[in-house]
Image: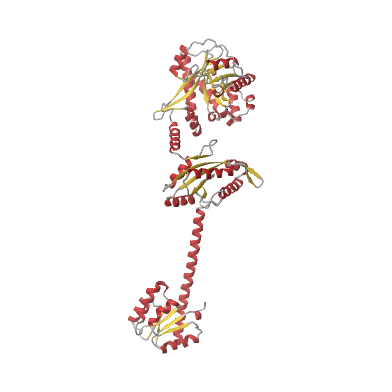
Amino acid sequence: MSLTEKHLLIVDDSTVNIELMFDLLDEYGFENVHGINDPREVLPHCQQQLPDLLLLDIRMPHLDGYAVIEELRAHFAEQMPPIIVLTAQIDDATRHRALSMGVRDFITKPFKQDEVLQRIRNTLNIEHRYQVRDKQADTLEQMVAKRTQELDRQSRTDPITQLPNRRGLDQALRTAALKASGTGLLFIAIDKLDDVVRLHGYRVADQLLHFITQRLRRQLDEECLLGLWGGSELLVITPTANPTKLLGLAEQLLVCFEQDQALDELLLPLSARIGISAEAGCFETERLVHMAALALPPLESLKVQHYTPALETKQRQRLHIQQAIRGATERGEMSLAFQPKLSLADHKILGAEALLRWQHPEFGLISPGEFIPLAEASGDILSIGDWVLDEAMRYISIWRAGGLLNDDFHIAVNVAARQLSRKDFAQQLLARLEQWQIPQRFLALEVTESGLMSDMNHARQQLAQLAEMNIAVAIDDFGTGQSSLAYIKTLPFSTLKIDRAFVMDLETSAIDRQLAHTITQLAHSVGCDVVAEGIETSAQAAYLSSIGCEAAQGYFYARPLPAEAFVAWCGEWQPLCSTPPLSLSPYGDR
């Protein structure tokens, strides 16, 4: 807009002065000029159309110029138009008062044409620059606000899936908590995504994650919010705390994982587990998420699980046990118990299996089945395993010195997969035997089938070194792991142990009898002897002896005993009379 298009308002009680100003401005092309000779009409006019410049007389009846300025300031504040005062008096008092009220300039009467025009142009130019500056400032402010809004959105959005990220989910949870109308959470852990990364790279994994989240989103109502909580962890926020509805929703989402995901030309397997938590009223957001995470089922277990206080108690107990494991041997809380191994042919003592026991001062006696997996997961099994080897050798040394052990006697020690994975395990074991001055025949090792399968190549190397040292190795829990029979012909071991799972029902199950018979034949075919564990009855012992099983251990003979009790038991043991074989066929009932 040019200056001549600006809206000018002339306020003067003299109609002559208004006409003179009209003529002057018209001569220079100003087209949008209005005049008012009653100052009381100024405010209504400005309310209808605010002028770009007000030419205001000071001395007028009804309202003087100062009063008009006060009215305009009261109504328009910072939006008040610029003012040039028209006055015949230009004394200092008038000037100072007008300037203090924000007047931009003065035009004296009688009007001088060039001066009037220049002062108007100057004021309009200055005001125009102010308006341009304000407009630019407003534009910049809008741009900043828009950019800030976009940055805030991005900070709450995952760039791969375009779903709310943890910050966005946390904000949604806080909003739901304030409503206190019931909220449910599904904590989804996506499994096998790491396998996709290893096989196909991060680009394909990102595409797969985006693909599966879109499938999940299509299964949800608009009221439900799906977001990415972690790398492969999703969270669904629902407006219901009903357990049945939440379980139904979880099962509906799991359907998306029943088949391989078709991505371009690839078929990629994924699986998922879901933990559920809910609150009917107000809740702490962090607590609700924690509850859902606690409910997340472990791998190879359930697919869906609700949070319960009992579940949390169990988890906390597990955590406390895991924390207490470290340093348990140094604090004297762990000990060894010994379960005798006997010959099924003549019931003479062949040796014993050293079993780890943990008596915690607060939790009491903790089952090895409970704390061993935790120690293996944390890595504490390495230090514990070293302690067990040293402790077993200490007893061997003491018993040899006391003449309690003959040359056929040995102590078997269980070795965890993480111990066997040490490159120097065999060498360190030999060094320990030399330190204790113990011949290798007095020590045997037992390794679980699943432990061997975790790293077959490395296990083969370690077992080969142990075989060269003449240290006997038994495969424990044979037949219960996810293994292949192919390793039997490639691994150097001397004994197979029949797991108690195949022994406990020998008297009633023809299948278990056939399995025990098959394992025994298999072991003998590769030059190994067989030890059966978990024997509790004479009938079990008699049948195992009849199929050629060489050795046995179990409650039928003795429970695992503390060292002193084991020594006493060995001193009191009298070989049983040979039990006649029962008429149990591997292929049928009695």
Question: Is residue 141 shown above or below 583?
Answer: below
Please identify the residue farthest to the left as the structure is shown: 93
Image position, residue 559 (x, y; %)? 47, 19
Image position, residue 166 (x, y; %)? 49, 49
- x 45%, y 19%: residue: 563
Front residue of 303/38: it is 303
Front residue of 313/455: it is 313
* 194 on left or right of 331: right
- x 43%, y 44%: residue: 287
Quarter of the figure with the C terminus: top right
Question: Is residue 224 shown above or below 67?
Answer: above
Image position, residue 331 (x, y; %)? 41, 28
- x 49%, y 62%: residue: 144
Front residue of 352/3: it is 352
Res 46 quadrant in image: bottom left
Please identify the residue farthest to the right as the structure is shown: 265
Image position, residue 391 (x, y; %)? 47, 22
Residue 426 visible in the shown view: no
How many numbered discs, if any?
Answer: 0
Res 19 quadrant in image: bottom left
Which color scheme does this rendered protein use? secondary structure
Residue 238 visible in the shown view: yes
